[in-house]
Amino acid sequence: MRAVWLTALLCLPLAVQAQQAVQQAQQQSSELTSTAVASQRRIDQLDDAARNALENYRQANQQISQLAEYNSRMAKVVAQQQQELSSLHAQLGSVEHTQAEMRPLISRMVDTLEQFVAVDMPFLLDERQQRVARLQDLLVDPDVSVAELYRRVLEAYQIESDYGRTLEAWRGELVQADDSRVVEFLRLGRLMLFYQTLDAQEQGYWDTATQRWQPLPNGYRRTLEQGMAIARTEQVPVMLRLPLPAVTQEQTP
């Protein structure tokens, strides 16, 4: 029994040491595991950071490429705008030269219009002469641009042109020598100009060859009344039996 106890007593320190060694080993293993886990976490974090950095790098490169393309397009736009600006400067110089040439031309156009009204059939003379007079005033008005002046002259020419394509009737003053009276006028474009007194007892036409009013046979009274009614849209259009510019003989409707 002594030998057994002695053996047991001798083995006890060894068992304690073994137990301590196991615990120490377990603790070291646990520490190594914690260290490994921490290291793996750092590795994962570094990996994520690397991926993020790579993604940011790729995005930065893409943005650089886009900016380079945008700058290239803007450079072309700027170059084109510079060309247009140079062209505009050249055009401005040309416009100034053109304006200097346009005023004499417009002045001649107004003079031509005035002469035309003077030798044309004597219809709406007050209105047409006043229109020409306004153009003459605009010619010497420094506040009126060349473009506006040209537009107004073209407008006057257009009005005169339209007279040749319209049928018109109006009441106005007829002046013959020293006599003046109110009559009814009928204009067929620029082909013929007629008048008829208010009592319908006298008719006449403008003779472009003699530049005078000539009498018409009384037989045209009814036809002239129809023409005036048509011009005033008081009657539907019908065929009118009116004389040609040269009236040589009396005609019975």
Image: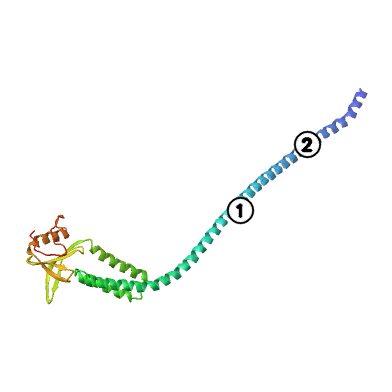
Q: Is residue 181 visible?
A: yes
User: In screen coordinates, is 193 left or right of 62?
Assistant: left
Does residue 215 lie above or below 16 as drawn? below
Q: Tell me the CA gap for discs 2 and 1.
A: 51 Å
Of tags 2 and 1, which is closer to the observer? Answer: 1
* Residue placed most toward the observer, 112 or 170: 112
- The residue drawn where x is 63% and y is 48% is 58
Q: Is residue 197 visible?
A: no
For label 2, the crowd category at 10 Å Cα-Cα, with few meaning under 14, some 14 to 19 and many 20 or more, is: few
- Residue 245 is labelled as none
User: In screen coordinates, is 114 left or right of 237?
Assistant: right
Q: Which residue is mark 2?
A: 29
Q: Secondary structure at mark 2?
A: helix
* Residue placed most toward the observer, 26 or 43: 43
User: In screen coordinates, is 217 left or right of 100?
Assistant: left
Write down the quadrant of residue 239 in the picture: bottom left
Q: How many marks?
A: 2
For the residues labelled 2 and 1, say whether their Cβ atoms are less than 8 Å apart.
Answer: no
Does residue 245 lie above or below 28 as drawn? below
Q: Position of residue 197 (x, y in %)?
A: 9, 67
| Three-letter amino acid code at the position of disc 2 | Ser
The quadrant of the image that shows the N terminus is: top right
The quadrant of the image that shows the C terminus is: bottom left
For label 1, the crowd category at 10 Å Cα-Cα, with few meaning under 14, some 14 to 19 and many 20 or more, is: few
| Three-letter amino acid code at the position of disc 1 | Ile
Q: Which residue is mark 1?
A: 64
Q: Position of residue 33 (x, y in %)?
A: 75, 38
Q: Position of residue 7 (x, y in %)?
A: 91, 26
User: In screen coordinates, is 43 left or right of 66?
Assistant: right
